[in-house]
Image (spheres, rainbow, N blue to C red):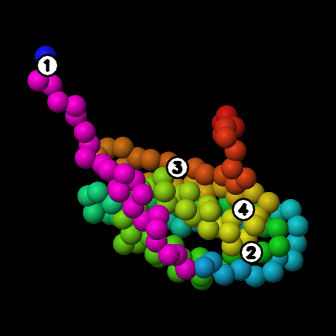
Amino acid sequence: MSNKRKKTTGYTDDHAAAGLDTSFPEIETWKNQFKSYEILIDDPEFTSVCPKTGLPDFGRLTIRYMPREKCMELKSLKEYLFNYRNLGIFQENIVNQVLDDVVKATNPVWAIIVGDFRPRGGISTIVEARYPRTEDMPAR
């Protein structure tokens, strides 16, 4: 019999779900006047908090979408994104939550959210989520 213990990172299911029960403010919209164009919104100073360590996460969040009938009002989007500043939430969850909320607000033709998070411990992370969601992501 071995005395070896299984190594663990100490992350729990509570860490994994942290922040997802947050009530985010509604993203306001305005009526779109045109068809078939793309909007790119860039937040180069996005911040959040690691739910386990409490350390800040820094990154760039980009939102690309093709509006259908509604466009996001930028001041309310900025206020929405400020809610992540002190929120303990995984980077993967941020990107997917933002995608869900952008889709809920605008019902776009398509949307892509990219979180490009700065290195912590020598490792950086890029997370991308797309709408409409599919089982398989296309090859790059």
Nearer the observer: mark 1 or 2; the answer is 1
- Is 6 colored magenta in this rendering? yes
Dot 4 amino acid type: Tyr
Q: Where's residue 77, x and y in %?
A: 59, 76
Q: Which residue is mark 1?
A: 2
- In the rendered view, does 123 fall on the left or right side of 110? left
Q: Which residue is mark 2?
A: 71
Q: Where's residue 58, x and y in %?
A: 40, 61
Q: CA distance from mark 3 to mark 4?
A: 16 Å
| Mark 1: secondary structure | loop
Q: Which residue is mark 3?
A: 127
Dot 2 amino acid type: Cys
Query: For the stretch drawn in magenta, what is the main secondary structure?
Result: loop
| Mark 2: secondary structure | strand
Crowd rating for badge 2 (residues with CA inside 10 Å; few <14, some 14–19, many 20+): many
Q: Which residue is mark 4?
A: 65
- At 42% from the left and 65% from the top, the residue drawn is 19
